Amino acid sequence: MIRNCCAAILMALLFAGCAGDTHHKMIVSTADQKMVVLRDGKPIAEYPVSTSKFGLGDRPGSNATPLGSHRVKRKIGSGAPAGAVFKGRRPTGEVIPVDAPGRDPIVTRILWLEGSEFKNRHSFARCIYIHGTPEERNIGIPASYGCVRMRSADIIELFGFVGTGARVVITPNPLPPRH
């Protein structure tokens, strides 16, 4: 009896940690090139973004942005300065300014997405992120290689209040009007 009770408690604790952030949901509209963030169903923030210049989809090697429901699987870059360059999800020590010419690395913060549906099952293996970009002049137009790009200040803010497990829905539809 005690053994069964302890096993049940351990299982409950194990699975309780799996849910993670159940309060936040991000909706990314590829039509609008915007993201709205909801907390408990209420909008709390809206950001311009940039999705793929190669269209929509989940095929490996396509550089397309995958549609559907995702979860934030990992958060990378806590405390890094704005413009900190990441290679292979590790900081390189380099910090580049906004709109620096010539290169387009992943900067500032990374929210690594895991697809929750068959149609986006490759998202994690494809390294689909929400991340900062130095090419802030291209925010608001499709310019990425599959990821969702944000301004460094915006990804720092978002990173600060969403946790692992937060839901991310990427849709081809426009966002509903806000009143």
Image (tube, helix red, strand yellow):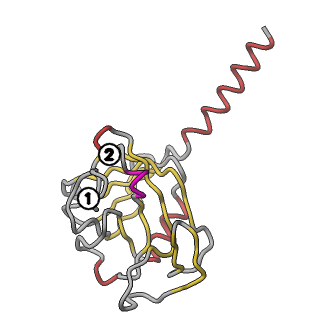
Dot 1 corresponds to which residue?
62
- Residue 31 spot, x, y in % from top left: 19, 61
- Residue 87 spot, x, y in % from top left: 51, 72
Say what amino acid the circle numbered 1 marks. Answer: Ser
- Whether residue 63 can be seen here: yes
Q: Secondary structure at mark 2?
A: helix
**Residue at the spot 43% in from the left edge and 53% down from the top edge:** 113
Relative height, residue 120 to residue 132 (above, below): above
Residue farthest toward the bottom in the current orientation of the protein:
101
The tag earlier along the polypeptide, 1 or 2, is: 1
User: In this rendering, would 140 be left or right of 18?
Assistant: left
Instruction: Report, in whole angstroms, how far the alpha carbon at label 1 lies from the one at label 2.
Output: 13 Å
Q: Which mark is residue 120?
A: 2
**Residue at the spot 35% in from the left edge and 68% down from the top edge:** 47
Q: Which mark is residue 149?
A: none
Image-quadrant location for residue 26: bottom left
Which span is picked out in magenta? 123-127
Magenta span: predominant SS is loop
Q: Nearer the viewer, residue 118 or 171?
A: 118
